[in-house]
Amino acid sequence: MRSRRPDARLRRAARAIFEASTGSPPRRIRAQAGGNTNHVFSIEAAEGFFVLRMDPSPAKVNEYRKERWAIDHARRMDIPAPNVIEVGVTPDDVAFMLARLEPGRPVADVVQTEPVLRQLGQYARKLHETSLSLFGGHHEGSTAPWKTWPEFLEHEFGLARRLEQLQALGLFDERLARRAADLVLRLGDDHEPRLNHGDLRLKNVLVTEDGRINAIIDWEFAVAAPAPEWDLALALHDLSVDEKDAFIDGYGLDDEALLAATPVLAALNMLHYAPFAAAAAQAGDDEQLRRYRRRFARVYDLYSL
């Protein structure tokens, strides 16, 4: 994806934020790909390499604070993650997060992904050791935490809405919707909140020249949820079978536990697709909807009879 060219005002703001946060001028500021409103800059300075994210909505600072909270937890567990320098709002009401990042390269540059995924599985297990007091994607001390798993599913995840979307598109029938809801709701019966990355995939990993993970990035979807199910449903769904094996072997999940978790992993995976399928329908993207229908019909499951 080609990055949008930021205007001079944004570049000046990026420079001002960096100088105010570090006390030194940047050597180079380069625009990176961002979202509709989020602007991302990579910054090279005497102290090293940095990433600056900016959003013109000051309310975005709450999401940045949550992300920093999750990253701080991860770093305390010796999980490689960016070092967040500062989160705040400029006098012009621009929310920002500045983080220092060790230089690395995307996993797409690596031929052998299995060793990287084995490391990622190990880090996932370590991350899931972090026990939290509340469910949800809000950092502790924020204004809208959910004490129970059903509260999180209702108010933040939007379980009922996702089920409605999948049924409206013909991806779920009523029986399957009830089954998925039951599986996901019962997940909270014997699981306490654990820190999950929320998008633990290869696109969010940077590695050294020899294939060692030196940064797990993009913690914006971090959430306190049951583990390992929440992260596994997202981490495994787009991997090959060999890559799945590598991740699971790294995590250390035995076959019996994995088999027991398979139904809820499938339910979570399908529910995560709901807003994307609804967006495709709204955009009239019949081709994308056809791909989703293939997946929901299990045409790629070549190991069950």
Image (tube, rainbow, N blue to C red):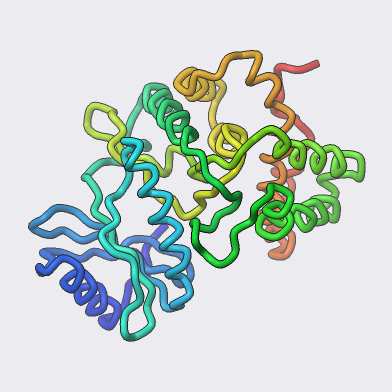
Asked if 81 appears above or below 248 in the picture, the reply is below
* Position of residue 83 measured from the top left corner of the image (x, y, whole percent): 27, 51
Left or right of residue 67: residue 142: right
User: Quarter holding the N terminus?
Assistant: bottom left
Asked if 162 appears above or below 53 in the picture, the reply is above
The residue lying at 42 percent from left, 23 percent from top is 118
Which picture quadrant has residue 95?
A: bottom left
- Taking depth in this image into account, of 96 and 109 the one nearest to the observer is 96
* Position of residue 287 measured from the top left corner of the image (x, y, whole percent): 70, 51
Would you say residue 237 is visible in this rendering? no
* Position of residue 70 measured from the top left corner of the image (x, y, whole percent): 43, 50
- Taking depth in this image into account, of 220 and 151 the one nearest to the observer is 151
- Taking depth in this image into account, of 153 and 140 the one nearest to the observer is 140
Left or right of residue 128: residue 6: left
Would you say residue 130 is visible in this rendering? yes
Asked if 178 appears above or below 31 in the picture, the reply is above
Which picture quadrant has residue 28?
A: bottom left
* Position of residue 113 measured from the top left corner of the image (x, y, whole percent): 40, 27
Asked if 305 appears above or below 224 in the picture, the reply is above
The residue lying at 71 percent from left, 52 percent from top is 153
The residue lying at 52 percent from left, 44 percent from top is 132
